[in-house]
Image: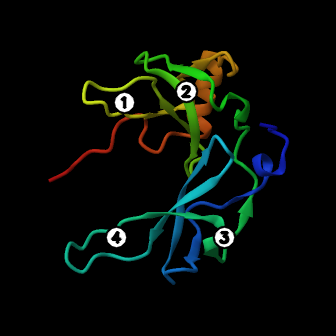
Amino acid sequence: MNPTDKKWTANIVQLNEPVTDKFTGQKGAAVLLDINTEGARTYLFQPKNLSPETHQPVSPFWVTEDRLSGVKLVPLPQRVPFEALGSIVTDRVTGFTGSLLGFAIHPTGCLHVQIQPAGTQKSGEKIAACDFCITRITGKELTKLTKAAIEEEHRNRPSPTGGVPPRRIS
């Protein structure tokens, strides 16, 4: 991997701005960007539509940039440590350890990582990957953040959930 390669440094679709999915014709917005170990970028597209049955937003789906029209391209909101992709990292809060699979960039600019632990469950299924805010992650390929740097990151690019899982309201 060469982090200076254009695929790693190219501009991204501005999140939460109106776009159209060329294949379905649906209008909506790219609400999350996912970048994997190969540098492939996929966007979570949220159609601007409510289900007539449930009156809830219709389900979002993943698209590649070439499917979107009306996009505004913007620079990455921060430095993304692409050199850490594939390396072993640990969530310092829980101790969850595994390979860094990819990055998720939220509209706030908050950078999350997906970590895949090694091994399988008793059933033979792989252990599920988990998503964490990068300020919680340590690893040889990552710059160690000071407490002040973490506080600044949280102030300038807050996690969309504030580190709390979304609440289910019945």
Along the line of sight, the residue nearer the viewer: 27 or 140: 140
- Element under label 3? helix
Applied colour scheme: rainbow
Residue 98: x and y in percent read 50, 23
Image height of 5 relative to 138, above or below: below
- Element under label 1? loop
Q: Which residue is mark 3?
A: 66
Q: Residues within 10 Å of mark 4 (few under 14, many from 20)?
A: some
Residue 49: x and y in percent read 38, 77
> Which residue is found at the position 72% from the left and 49% from the top?
76
> Which residue is found at the position 43% from the left and 20% from the top?
96
Image height of 92 relative to 110, above or below: above
Residue 14 falls in image quadrant: bottom right
Amino acid type, mark 2: Ser
The residue mark sitting in front, 2 or 4, is: 2
Q: Residues within 10 Å of mark 1 (few under 14, many from 20)?
A: some
Name the mark on residue 168. none
Residue 151: x and y in percent read 58, 25
N-terminal of the pair, mark 2 or mark 4, is: 4
Do the CB atoms of the residues marked 2 and 3 lie less than 8 Å apart?
Answer: no
Calculate the distance from the C-alpha at mark 4 to the C-alpha at mark 1: 29 Å
Q: Which residue is mark 1?
A: 127
Image quarter hosting the N terminus:
top right
- Element under label 4? loop
Calculate the distance from the C-alpha at mark 3 to the C-alpha at mark 4: 22 Å
Do the CB atoms of the residues marked 3 and 4 lie less than 8 Å apart?
Answer: no
